[in-house]
Image (tube, grey):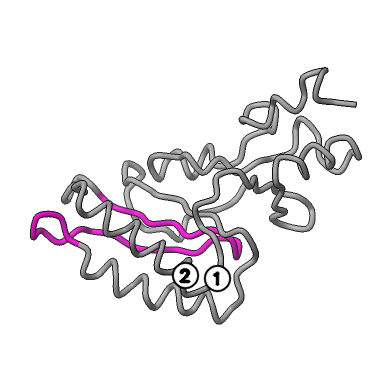
Amino acid sequence: MIKLDHIKFPDHSRVWIYQADRKLSAEEKGMILSKGKEFTSSWAAHGHELMADIHIELDHFIILVLDEQVEAASGCSIDKSMKFVLDLQKDLGTNFTNRLISAVWTDNGVQLYSYQEAKTALENGEISSISEVFDNTAQNLNELKTKWLKPLKDTWLKKLLEPENVQ
């Protein structure tokens, strides 16, 4: 279980999870946090300040947290957060929006796999149906804390376990 107790927001808070397509360096994480703190401190919806924060987890994940009971995000404010992430992507030469790369928690930390790489890793026994995969579709902080990691057999990668996909 990955501990996220340092995120000091209520469990109902909304989250957006962005996974890098590679490990982030210390310098990159510092830059993301600096720009992220600047962004979240000025983030607003219809002129109302949003109670938000940014975190980097496990050198691969940017997590935006927003307490929508204080003020809810609007379509425009969500668009602004997406622009912030896309600007980071451009600045760092990395991808935070490729949903076809799966992150698996292993003894060596976070390992990233394309669909084909995950298939090969299953065939080679590097990962299995019970390997823990990060589910970046969590909607709130409680889901992030309790359901971020799921067995591969309970994720979209389960189709790799079907007989026609396993050799």
Disc 1: CA contacts within 10 A as few (<14), some (14-19) or many (>=20) = few
- Looking at the rendered structure, which numbered label has been put on residue 90? 2
- Rendered-image quadrant of the C terminus: top right
Please, what secondary structure does the residue beneath circle 2 have?
A: helix
Amino acid on which the number 2 mark rests in the picture: Lys
Amino acid on which the number 1 mark rests in the picture: Gly
Asked if residue 18 is positioned above or below residue 155 in the image, the reply reads below
Whole-percent x and y of residue 135?
55, 40
Give the magenta part as a residue range.
Answer: 44-67
Whole-percent x and y of residue 138?
45, 40
- Looking at the rendered structure, which numbered label has been put on residue 101? none
Please, what secondary structure does the residue beneath circle 1 have?
A: loop
The residue tagged 1 is 93
Q: Residue at x 83, y 42 (%)?
A: 121
Q: Residue at x 62, y 35 (%)?
A: 150
Q: Residue at x 62, y 30 (%)?
A: 155
Q: Quadrant of residue 84?
A: bottom left
Whole-percent x and y of residue 21?
61, 58
Residue furthest to the bottom in view is 27
Principal secondary structure, stretch drawn in magenta: strand
Task: Based on the picture, tell me whether residue 160 belongs to the magenta stretch.
Answer: no
**Number of marks in the image?**
2
Residue furthest to the left in view is 47
For the residue pair 19 and 114, the one nearer the viewer reads as: 114
Q: Do the numbered discs 2 and 1 sit on residues whose CB atoms are within 8 Å?
A: yes
